[in-house]
Amino acid sequence: MPASGPLAPLLGRVLLWLPVTFAVWYLTAGWHLAPVAWAAHHLLQFWLPEAVADLSLRQNELLLITRFGEVGGQMVANPPPGENLGFLTNPLSYSYSLPLFAALALATPLPNRWRRLAIGLGVLLLIELFSMLATQIKTLVFATGGAFVAQQQWGAHARDAVALAYQMGSLLLPMVMPLVVWMAGHGAYLAQLAPALRKAPRP
Amino acid sequence: MLRFLVLFMAILATLFTVEMLAPVQQAVVLPWTSLLAGVSGWLMQLFDSQIAVAGKVIRSTTSSFGVSIEPGCNGVEAMIVLLAAIAAFPASLLYKLKGLLAGFVAIQALNLARIISLFYLGLWNATLFEWAHLYIWQALIMLDALIVFLVWVRFIPGGGPAGPTPDNGGEASVGAG
């Protein structure tokens, strides 16, 4: 066996699965984004009803309709009908963790592969919900000309927390969570790949 | 495994928060990003004379197209992920440093390939550029970090064949799926 052991075959299988999982992910985007967008819509309406009028999917994009609008050069809350500010964002930019995890899970030769895949995707959809919420709240905080911050009376710490949550949700979590979920769900295989992972870590 | 993952996530969250701080961005991340743009531009100028670099922006001198290297594209986040994983796993300091050095080379080499390929892809087709930029390369860079970590763990000194041994007494298998 080469020095890389079973790592090279694993990598090969992952690279073969990636085009397939990315294609399926993109073609079914309306389906897997829908429950996350639905949950985000209801959470935002519950939490910030005076700021969020609607959140819905437009094909593969997410449209946030706020309760703010520009009237006479001023950003105001509850503008006249039809004057509400809307923002389009791309939820796929933090959803690519799904095809990455799917490729890893399908490339891993363990029993109950599809069950592990389904559980992992479920966890990642919850992470995606966090990313979606963080992205929408960041939009409200930083793109409504201060109207949202004034309405909610959020201070500098709250704004910093939103900025950090946005960076986490849009940048870090989509990158790292597929690997974490894969490692958590495929420990038995990881122990074969790297025996040190099977031993109890002691500092 | 659970202990490792919890420690890994804690270190990761801490390092990522530190990376976001303005002084760290000014003193480390932005200079690094500009250096990366400079190296990418220099490599591209070896075979393409129509490249110009200014700060973190690489642009074509014959068209209006250019790319700006932003957070998420500079390999820093992938390095933080690898650093957190290596720091969370028990090994000697020297072995950890070796892993980080190897990981740095592997991640940044692939990141240079990402930047250069994205530049030419962007010159050719905007849709493919968006796809590769937002989705494909992100996944490949993280896959790179994962493989480096698994290779590193595989060759940890004393991390031989798994199973109950006099050293660990088989007391705590953490490999359960």
Image: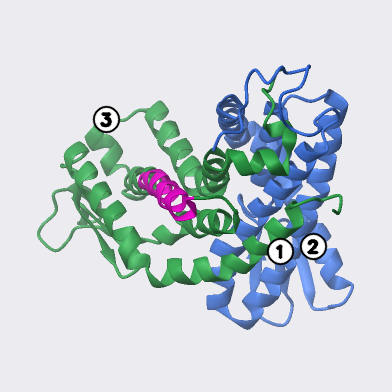
Residue corresponding to mark 1: B115
**Which colour is chain B painted?**
blue
Give the residue displayed 57% in from the left and 70% down from the top. Answer: A19
The circle on residue B40 is 2
Front in this rendered view, residue B24 or B122: B122
Q: Label 3 neighbourhood size at 10 Å, few (<14), some (14-19), many (20+)? A: few
Where is residue A18? Give x, y as percent.
58, 65
Above or below — where is B156 with respect to A140? Answer: above
Which amino acid, mark 3?
Answer: Gln
Give the residue displayed 83% in from the left and 24% down from the top. Answer: B93
Mark 3 and mark 1: Cα distance apart in space: 42 Å
**Which colour is chain A painted?**
green
- Residue depth check, mark 3 versus mark 1: number of the one nearer the observer: 1
Q: Earlier in the sequence, mark 1 or mark 2?
A: 2
Which amino acid, mark 2?
Answer: Ser
Above or below — where is A109 with respect to B50? Answer: above
